[in-house]
Image: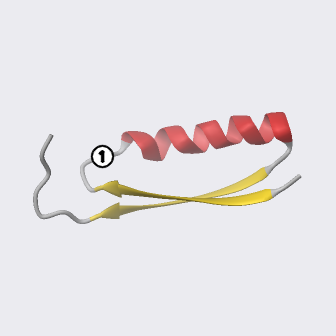
Amino acid sequence: MSAFRVVLLVPSSHTTMEKEVPEVLRRVAAATGDRFTFHSSRMRMKTVSR
């Protein structure tokens, strides 16, 4: 059993990954017994383009 810290930086307009990554980590933790802490932050951007 190991412990991991996962950090995610996302553009200010993007929210999908902030919801999906913790769910994936919960599933991996349940299957492997590993522990995860998840930290996310939004980056302020002057312009966002596709």
The answer to which image quadrant residue 16 occupies is: top left
- At a point 26% along the width and 56% down the height, the residue shown is 12
- At a point 62% along the width and 37% down the height, the residue shown is 24
- At a point 10% along the width and 57% down the height, the residue shown is 47
Position of 27 with respect to 43 (left or right) is right
Q: Amino acid at mark 1?
A: His
Residue bearing mark 1: 14
Q: Is residue 32 above or below residue 40?
A: above
- At a point 71% along the width and 59% down the height, the residue shown is 4
Identity of the residue furthest to the right in this view: 1
Q: Position of residue 21 (x, y in %)?
A: 54, 42
Q: Position of residue 46 (x, y in %)?
A: 12, 64
Q: Position of residue 19 (x, y in %)?
A: 48, 41
Position of 9 with respect to 31 (left or right) is left
Other-residue count near label 1 (Cα within 10 Å), few / some / many at <14 / 14–19 / ≥20: few
The answer to which image quadrant residue 9 occupies is: bottom left
Position of 38 with respect to 41 (left or right) is right
Q: Position of residue 29 (x, y in %)?
A: 77, 42
